[in-house]
Image: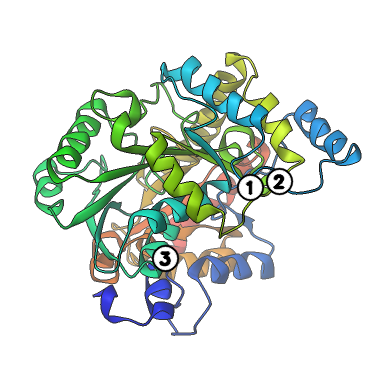
Amino acid sequence: MINNFTPWQRTAHGANLLNSSGHPGVTIFEEITGLANKHKAINLGQGFPDTEGPNEIRQLAIEAIQYGANQYAPGSGIPELRQAIAAHQEHFYAISIDPDAQVVVTTGATEAIAASLLAFLEPGDEVVTFEPYYDSYGATIGLANAIHKVVQLKGPHFEPDMDELRRTVTDKTRVILVNNPHNPTGTVLDQTILQEIIAVAHKHDCVIIADEVYEHLTFEQKHIPIASLPGGFDRTITISSAGKSFSFTGWKVGWATGPESLIIAVRTVKQFLTYSSGPAFQPAVAEALGLPDTFYSDFSASLGNTGQILAHGLESAGIPVIRPKGTYFLVADISGFKLNNAIEATRLMPEQLGVAAIPMSVFVHPENQKDYQSLIRFAFCKQPAVIAEAVQRLQQLPEVLNR
């Protein structure tokens, strides 16, 4: 049980901080990245783009620095950005929010997640997430000395079992943390599942934290915010960021929206984490949120096409793929090969193929790793030429796996 560990051990457990050799402070991500750098491999383990966001938006940040936007921004974010976030929610989802009371700007979505969890959790409270889960969830739940419960998403569709969800969420559950579109599986939850999450949250009086950073990165379907559904808004904190929507991951500008009572709690914690950040980036992100709808549709279509190139390339090599409905990521299954352990395989790939990827088992609790041990996550948020070169190299993956 996480609750029996020291604070450092709880965080390490939640974030997979121990590699298989037991070395503290070294994540699998860092190990694979180190191998990729050592062997000059194409790194499809890293979930960030290798292209810049819109030039006109970057120029606004440069100008803001030149004209003096270099001191603390307001703790909740500059008014222009909060107004732009509110307008975005109204325009895309018909969710009406007060920019002065129902929005807080954060240092990326990761801080918004941490501030939200820390605001509502007491030691011993239970948090339910889907598994696999973004690694910061387990780390922050551990820091709060809370108990992390999971509902598994299993291939090939990575959809939760509704009976398991209803059994897992109880009166001890304080927070249901929903990542949709979902990293690392690439799935997009449908409205029926989201409505059931709302129902169990009402039944057990839970707060819903909706991590929706990939909201504009869906393929052939529209994202549905859980806060837009009947009964959803009043108990939901919705989180997003500029990093995924505009390819400005290093700017670390995120936000949380929701009912005033919930946002006050998030803002209260946030002020003791970073207080404020990115004063020069905030006006640029405000402008970006007003880009034409075609920017979003073109971006998702382009990314989806790149994902299809990678998926087709893996399949042509004989590697089964679970094609994503959204996000940057797709999942490959090596269960049919002699070497079917994804951790071992991904350690070999940088040197032997010149391609790096991440084993899916690092995104799950240790006791459940066997259920995901043959799955590998590939990031396809790279230039088409890079993906094409990776595909060429991956044609030799079956040979590596069958030695």
Element carrying mark 2: loop
Tell me the residue at 32%/59% (across/down).
Answer: 121
Three-letter code for the amino acid on which mark 2 is drawn: Gly
Crowding at mark 1 (Cα within 10 Å: few <14, some 14-19, many 20+): many
Q: Position of residue 164 (x, y in %)?
A: 12, 49
Three-letter code for the amino acid on which mark 3 is drawn: Ala
Q: Quadrant of the C terminus?
A: bottom left
Residue 375 lies in what quarter of the image?
bottom left
Label placed on residue 278: 2
Q: Please name the residue that numbered disc 3 is placed on.
A: 139
Height in image: 395 above or below 227?
A: below
Q: Earlier in the sequence, mark 2 or mark 1?
A: 1
Q: Position of residue 40 (x, y in %)?
A: 69, 62
The Cα–Cα distance between marks 1 and 3, rounded to whole angstroms, is 19 Å
Closer to the camera in the image, 90 or 401: 90
Q: Please name the residue that numbered disc 1 is placed on.
A: 252
The Cα–Cα distance between marks 2 and 1, rounded to whole angstroms, is 7 Å
Crowding at mark 3 (Cα within 10 Å: few <14, some 14-19, many 20+): many
Q: Position of residue 71 (x, y in %)?
A: 79, 48
Three-letter code for the amino acid on which mark 1 is drawn: Lys
Element carrying mark 3: helix
